[in-house]
Amino acid sequence: MKDPSLHPLAPDYLKRLKKAARRLPRARRYELVGEIEAHLIEALPAGASEAEARNVLDRLGEPAEIVAEAGPSQLLKAPVAAHEWWAILLLLIGGLVIPFLGWFIGVVLLWSSRVWTLRDKLIGTLVLPGGLATPAFVFTFVAASTGSGNDNPGGGVNYYLTLVLLGGLAVLPVLTAVYLSRRAARTEAAA
Amino acid sequence: MQRIVDQGTLSQLRRGVIEYCVLALLRDGERYGFELVRTLSEVPGMVTSEGTLYPLLSRLRRAGVVETSWRESPSGPPRRYYRLTASGRSVLEAFSGEWVSFRNAVDHFLEQEKAV
């Protein structure tokens, strides 16, 4: 970003700020970086001396410190959102309650939340679409097909192998749920 | 033995009240971010780093006690102006009342301590 109204020291500061702010949800990151940039444009004329510029940046504070302050308000706490907990729950078992649709509502809640970053949302959606309903569905399918094919001598081994694979498949959505709730709790505590 | 005031306690106190100082600055009309930040940091002992005030303004906006709108600036890019909402005004009023009795209570004990 080559802005003629910025002091030569400002872009480096903004770069560090953007890097520190990566953990914030996108809208919040844009807002913060935009405000700090506006501050620099006003406080730091492009022709300011290096000493003046360093004073302005010192008064502004370290980027990491500013991002850390994007934390919870002491006295004006936003109500703890049930929204996020429903999203996690529906992503995990929604598909078991109402096939497909339950999970899909979870996805909508996940993406409409401001707590998670884009990466969190992608993980929440793609690490096992369907949640626990997917291994459950595959299990019933496999059980039905091996039940009818009992005369196959290799069927037993295949059956247990499939069970192990399904077990692994069932762990994925659980891990995702744990991950999402940790990220949500972290944002609640730190953002 | 000399004891130094715990910086953590002081910064907690500042954190607790600075939001209300922002609301108070907006009592008589809207101001833009940089203006608010400079006004607050000109009073010694209130702000340790100016940059941390911007996330605070964002929180106030999300809490619905202030609202913002963009205005053209006579020089440079448009500015985001902050203004009190009705809810912000009542939060400020409630706090102002509480603050007076809190301050009096603390003073009461501090002065008593001195007199002994």
Image (cartoon, rainbow, N blue to C red):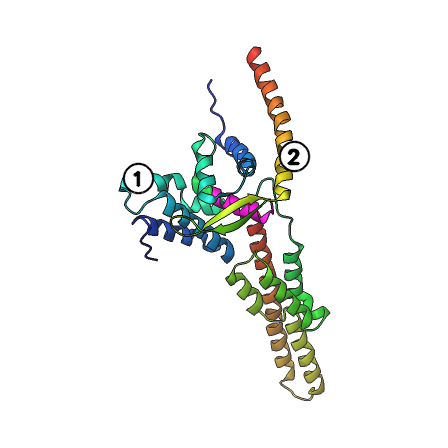
Q: Residue A175: horizontal and vertical position, in percent?
A: 58, 62
| Position of the N terminus of chain A by quadrant | bottom left
Q: Is residue A47 above or below residue A109?
A: above
Marks counted in the figure total 2
Amino acid marked by disc 1: Glu
Q: In this view, does B78 lie above or below A159?
A: above
Q: Which range of residues does the magenta coloring cover?
A: B53-65
**Does B101 sit left or right of B6 as displayed?**
right
Task: Say which element carries label 2.
Answer: helix
Q: Identify the disc placed on residue A52.
A: 1
Task: Say which element carries label 1.
Answer: helix
Q: Does the magenta stretch include residue B63?
A: yes
Q: Is residue B27 above or below residue A20?
A: above
Q: Residue A11: horizontal and vertical position, in percent?
A: 34, 52
Q: Nearer the viewer, residue B101 or A142?
A: B101
Residue B91, quarter of the rendered image = top right
Q: Pointers 1 and 2 in contact (CB under 8 A)?
A: no
Residue A85, quarter of the rendered image = bottom right
Q: Distance between the residues labelled 1 and 2?
A: 41 Å
**Does A165 sit left or right of A12 as displayed?**
right
- Residue drawn at x 68%, y 83% is A146
Instruction: Identify the residue under disc 2.
Output: B94
Amino acid marked by disc 2: Ala
Q: Which chain carries label 1?
A: A
Decide if residue A100 is in sight here. Answer: yes
Q: Residue B83: horizontal and vertical position, in percent?
A: 55, 44
Q: How crowded is mark 1: few (under 14 residues within 10 Å), some or many (20 or more)?
A: some
Characterize the magenta stretch by its predominant secondary structure.
helix
- Residue drawn at x 39%, y 38% is A59
**Does A38 sit left or right of B105 as displayed?**
left
Residue at the limit of the structure toward the front, as seen here = B74
Decide if residue B48 is in sight here. Answer: no
